[in-house]
């Protein structure tokens, strides 16, 4: 988190209290050349950190750059600026070989359980792949794949089946098994449960929570649904158009949001209690946040100023910096 | 060699060695290790022989090619003549007992010469296939792996495609003479540019799959990804292209021999024989027939095999049933639905009574569903996927997917029974009385036309008004759905607007026939929560201002709480509980509703978020596995012996609510809660193995049903 910039100064010696992952001023632009430089960056100066055993939630609308940040951390997207440090080592532009070494510690669970497993490979082959390229023998890899399947609640025999033979929830468990098979320390979960039904979603969320408690894992939990995030995350980072709007402890961000965008996001998430939902709806309508359609990019100013009911000329001309408000850090002139 | 089979083993071998190389370089050499898993069954499974056998053309083609190759290779043992034997007593003869296919101008036996030439022709054509398809595929895989290399390779292939192929071939012949294998290899190189183009698109699509990302995170090298995750996906195209290029190679080879660039003179070749025959086309027309026919049949055989392999298994299954099929089905279901006199229902009121929907084969998907939607009210149909809520919604519009039909019950609308109504009646109802908005707004809009064109033409079709009037109406509709700059939006194409805007346009499109009932199938699922809230507000305003009724299909209990007046909770094709929204959500009577609420993280705030969410063990049973008794029994925490018998819907005691649970009263009295499994997962998994039940992994036909359900969405 950017509030902890001071901790980042120490570059060389991994201190005991140092974050497992430290993202500083990350910038990602799509495309190349002059056109890309002119377009607004997909990720624009995002900073946060994850401590060992901690879960950080990354929340935002579609197009807010949350998945791009996950991809940049995993090395699937090139960074245009800033740095990503894993366990004290700079991996911003790490070579493929270096990434391969990290691959075991830094893993991912992707959104779509239908396409995150190769339909032409057996489950066993998919699970064994990361082990095999690290030199684990075939027999042992298979054994570990079977054990991992049992751990995520699937039968051993699943190892010889193909992804098409499983339901969405089961496939997502397999994806979790695949991520955890080489004892990672940090798992990037990119919308890992948003394609699942309620009851399966709860099963996978519980599984992720159990595994975290069992193995001291850290998660970067990327989701558009703030309610799902607050189940797992200790801290939440709220993004809008590639910039951090607010970050802080999960309870603080969801219970008493300071940034108008976070307020709109929390208020828009419907609760299954009709009377309470009616109240929330009135509150949301009272907020007066304008629709996304009316918003155009605001270069130089606050990215949310076009939709913000509180916006003034200051907001349209000067980009607010993150500052501490209560337990959170908020990027708003009027928080 | 047999073309249809030959490319597969060759390619598989190549992959095997290549994969060995890949894994060895990445993980250090470990001799004796075979990457069994990656390719095991690849070709056999994806390109199953079944597809070949299913096509009579392909069977004939394979038979012909096999026969030709066998005849050619065994020719010395059974043919009565050598290729050079001249029989001057029978020059240019037709078919005789001595010469079955006749003789040429030197009295040489045609059958012998055709057979002798066959192996060479087929073999050298195979060179073109291997070089052309192999090179094209490798280039495509390399290009798909990187943006820069793609640029370089694409420019290079563009240059290659602009070169005059015939001239190059003739130049090569001038340089190296009529060395057929070399010529065919050069031809392969020329053809590879085209193959590259075909393969590149597919390879790029495969590279963007999430499992490729996952493999990259694993640390799999670019080569490993190409070989293990991209190549298998290309195998189908490779085999199809091989069969077609094989035929092309044969024709070009014959053409070259015809103009004199075939094998050296005494050696027989099909092209050379046709050339010889062409000089006697007036005095001995028969001479052309055997060689020409054999060449034509061989090319046809290769094409037939290519066609059979290339045919997608589902190519014939259309998204919507044909008109004839719908008429037939309508007639069938009209018979199926009980001929009870349609109770005249008040205008603008939908009354569904005992609706059943099933696959033509007999498997029911929805059974005995009843609900009412009064004018100006919103009914929520809620449940997990596979519970039949979308099928129920689509049956209201007569839009059930192919192979699925209403098998019983009534859909009463304006005093008419729409269940099994003929297509003509449904056409009058759809859009005008009952309209649909779907989950993916982009699917409702045609990307080829502007929003304005689509909206204006729909308004004109549904209301029969003039163009100018319709345009004004379209503007009005867009303003009605909360679009501020309607005039600009009318001029845009669907891809130029955001998802939320597209859903507003889709709603405007649905409203263009002034429907009185809107069927909304997960209208906000694909949208951001902030946009969802706006769309729900819009729907609420429309309901309030215009008296529109809405059937809202959703899996989100929060959406139900927000907008629905009444709700029907569906599980495994049945309504398990229905009534007023406040009653159902605040005081659920059915264990399934209770469990859904307990599993919903939205039901909790960060402060009181439980350590573990409640879960429902297992999954929604497939229709073929529905038990005779309570369908939720296997997953229910409160199930008892009474649940084995069929459970009727009984009044739940609050307003006009009904519930389908024998223990509803008991549960209400005891105030039971659906408990979260508070034991860490690994300790309950053994118990939970009913969860991923052995042999209960959905079988193929069930998945196809899932597909049906997804498709129609």
Image: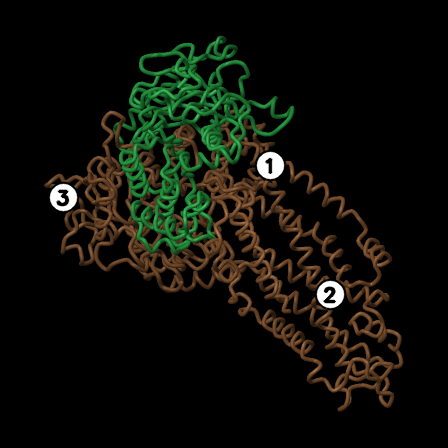
Instruction: Please tell me whether mark 3 sits on a helix, a strand or a loop.
Output: helix
Q: Nearer the viewer, mark 1 or mark 3?
A: 3
Which shade of the palette goes to chain A?
green
Q: Chain of mark 2?
A: B
In the image, is residue B39 above or below residue B69? above
Q: Which mark is residue B250?
A: 2
Q: Nearer the viewer, mark 1 or mark 2?
A: 2
Looking at the rendered structure, whether the residues under marks 1 and 2 are on a common chain is answered as yes
Which shade of the palette goes to chain B?
brown
In the rendered view, how is the structure colored? by chain
Q: Is residue B546 in sight in this rendering?
A: no
* CA gap, disc 1 and disc 3: 55 Å
Q: Are marks 1 and 3 in contact (CB under 8 Å)?
A: no
Which of these two is toward me, B285 or B469?
B285
Q: Which mark is residue B667?
A: 3
Q: Position of residue A73 (x, y in %)?
A: 46, 30
Which of these two is toward me, B307 or B568?
B307
Looking at the rendered structure, whether the residues under marks 2 and 3 are on a common chain is answered as yes
Q: Which mark is residue B226?
A: none
Q: Earlier in the sequence, mark 1 or mark 3?
A: 1
Instruction: Please tell me whether mark 1 sits on a helix, a strand or a loop.
Output: loop
Residue denoted by label 1: B450
Residue at 28% across, 52% down: B574
Q: Earlier in the sequence, mark 1 or mark 2?
A: 2
User: Mark 1 packing: few (<14 Cα in 10 Å), some, or many (20+)?
Assistant: some
């Amino acid at each position: 988190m950017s509030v902890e910039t001071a901790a980042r100064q120490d570059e060389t010696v991994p201190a005991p209290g140092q974050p497992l992952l430290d993202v500083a001023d990350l910038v990602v632009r799509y495309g190349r050349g002059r056109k890309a430089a002119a377009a607004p960056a997909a990720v624009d100066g995002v900073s946060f950190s994850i401590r060992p055993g901690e879960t950080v939630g990354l929340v935002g609308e579609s197009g807010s750059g949350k998945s791009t940040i996950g991809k940049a951390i995993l090395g699937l997207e090139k960074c245009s600026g800033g740095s990503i440090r894993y366990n004290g080592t700079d991996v911003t532009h790490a070579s493929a070989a270096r990434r391969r070494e990290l691959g075991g510690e830094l893993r991912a669970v992707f959104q779509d359980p239908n396409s995150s497993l190769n339909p032409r490979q057996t489950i066993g082959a998919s699970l064994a792949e990361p082990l095999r390229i690290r030199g684990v023998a075939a027999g042992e890899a298979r054994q570990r794949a079977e054990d991992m399947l049992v751990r995520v609640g699937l039968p051993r025999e699943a190892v010889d089946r193909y992804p098409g033979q499983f339901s969405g929830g089961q496939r997502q468990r397999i994806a979790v098994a695949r991520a955890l098979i080489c004892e990672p320390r940090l798992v990037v979960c990119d919308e890992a449960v948003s394609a699942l039904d309620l009851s399966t979603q709860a099963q996978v969320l519980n599984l992720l929570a159990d595994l975290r408690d069992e193995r001291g894992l850290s998660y970067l939990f990327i989701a558009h649904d703030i309610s799902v995030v607050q189940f797992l995350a200790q801290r939440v980072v709220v993004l809008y158009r590639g910039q951090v709007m607010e970050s802080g402890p999960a309870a603080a961000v969801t219970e008493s949001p300071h940034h108008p965008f976070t307020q709109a996001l929390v208020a828009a998430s419907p609760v299954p209690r009709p009377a309470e939902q009616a109240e929330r709806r009135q509150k949301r309508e009272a907020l007066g946040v304008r629709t996304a359609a009316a918003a155009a990019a605001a270069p130089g100013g606050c990215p949310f100023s076009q939709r913000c009911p509180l916006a003034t000329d200051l907001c349209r001309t000067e980009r607010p910096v993150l500052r501490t408000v209560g337990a959170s850090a908020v990027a708003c002139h009027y928080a | 060699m047999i073309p249809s089979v030959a490319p597969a083993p060759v390619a598989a071998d190549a992959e095997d060695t290549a994969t060995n190389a890949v894994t060895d370089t990445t993980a250090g050499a470990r001799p004796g290790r075979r990457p069994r898993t990656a390719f095991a069954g690849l070709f056999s499974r994806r390109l199953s022989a079944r597809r070949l056998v299913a096509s009579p053309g392909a069977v004939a083609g394979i038979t012909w090619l096999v026969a030709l190759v066998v005849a050619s290779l065994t020719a010395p043992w059974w043919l009565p003549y050598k290729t050079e034997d001249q029989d001057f007593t029978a020059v240019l003869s037709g078919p005789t007992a001595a010469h079955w296919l006749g003789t040429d101008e030197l009295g040489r036996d045609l059958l012998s010469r055709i057979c002798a030439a066959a192996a060479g022709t087929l073999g050298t054509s195979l060179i073109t296939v291997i070089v052309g398809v192999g090179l094209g595929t490798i280039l495509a895989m390399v290009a798909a792996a990187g943006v820069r290399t793609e640029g370089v390779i694409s420019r290079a292939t563009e240059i290659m495609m602009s070169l005059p192929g015939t001239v190059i071939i003739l130049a090569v012949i001038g340089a190296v003479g009529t060395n057929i294998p070399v010529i065919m290899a050069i031809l392969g190189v020329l053809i590879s540019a085209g193959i590259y183009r075909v393969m590149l698109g597919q390879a790029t699509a495969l590279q963007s799959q999430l499992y490729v990302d996952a493999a990259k995170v694993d640390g799999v090298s670019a080569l490993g990804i190409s070989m293990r995750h991209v190549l298998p996906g290309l195998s189908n195209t490779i085999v199809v292209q091989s069969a077609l290029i094989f035929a092309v190679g044969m024709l070009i080879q014959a053409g070259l021999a015809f103009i004199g660039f075939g094998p050296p003179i005494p050696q027989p070749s099909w092209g050379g024989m046709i050339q010889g025959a062409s000089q006697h086309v007036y005095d001995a027309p028969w001479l052309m027939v055997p060689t020409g026919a054999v060449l034509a049949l061989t090319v046809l055989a290769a094409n037939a095999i290519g066609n059979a392999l290339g045919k997608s298994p589902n190519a014939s299954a259309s998204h919507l049933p044909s008109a004839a099929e719908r008429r037939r089905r309508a007639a069938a279901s009209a018979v199926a639905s009980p001929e009870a006199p349609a109770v005249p229902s008040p205008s603008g009121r939908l009354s569904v009574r005992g609706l059943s929907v099933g696959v033509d084969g007999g498997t029911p998907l929805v059974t005995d569903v009843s609900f009412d939607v009064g004018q100006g009210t919103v009914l929520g149909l809620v449940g997990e996927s596979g519970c039949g809520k979308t099928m129920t919604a689509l049956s209201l519009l007569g839009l059930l997917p192919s192979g699925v039909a209403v098998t019983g019950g009534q859909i009463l609308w304006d005093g008419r029974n729409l269940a099994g109504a003929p297509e003509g009646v449904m056409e009058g109802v759809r859009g005008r009385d009952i309209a649909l908005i779907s989950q993916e707004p982009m699917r409702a809009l045609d990307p080829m036309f502007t929003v304005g064109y689509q909206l204006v033409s729909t308004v004109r079709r549904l209301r029969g008004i003039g163009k100018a009037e319709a345009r004004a109406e379209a503007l009005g509709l867009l303003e009605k759905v909360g679009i501020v700059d309607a005039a600009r939006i009318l001029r845009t194409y669907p891809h130029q607007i955001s998802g939320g805007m597209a859903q507003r346009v889709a709603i405007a499109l649905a409203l263009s026939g002034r429907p009185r009932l809107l069927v909304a199938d997960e209208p906000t699922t694909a949208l951001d929560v902030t946009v969802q809230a706006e769309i729900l507000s819009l729907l609420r305003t429309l309901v309030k201002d215009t008296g529109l009724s809405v059937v809202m299909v959703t899996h989100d209990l929060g959406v139900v709480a927000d907008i629905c007046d009444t709700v029907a909770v569906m599980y495994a094709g049945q309504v398990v509980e229905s009534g007023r929204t406040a009653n159902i959500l605040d005081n659920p009577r059915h264990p399934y509703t209770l469990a859904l609420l307990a599993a919903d993280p939205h039901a909790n705030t960060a402060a009181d978020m439980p350590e573990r969410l409640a879960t429902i063990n297992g999954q929604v049973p497939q229709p073929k596995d529905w038990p005779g008794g309570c369908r939720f029994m296997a997953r229910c925490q409160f199930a008892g012996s009474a649940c084995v018998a069929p459970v009727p819907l009984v009044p739940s005691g609050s307003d006009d609510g009904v519930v389908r649970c024998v223990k509803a009263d008991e549960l209400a009295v005891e105030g039971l809660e659906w408990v979260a499994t508070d034991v860490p997962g690994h300790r309950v998994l053994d118990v939970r193995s009913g969860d991923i039940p052995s042999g209960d992994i959905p079988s193929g036909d069930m998945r196809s049903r899932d597909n049906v359900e997804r498709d129609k969405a």
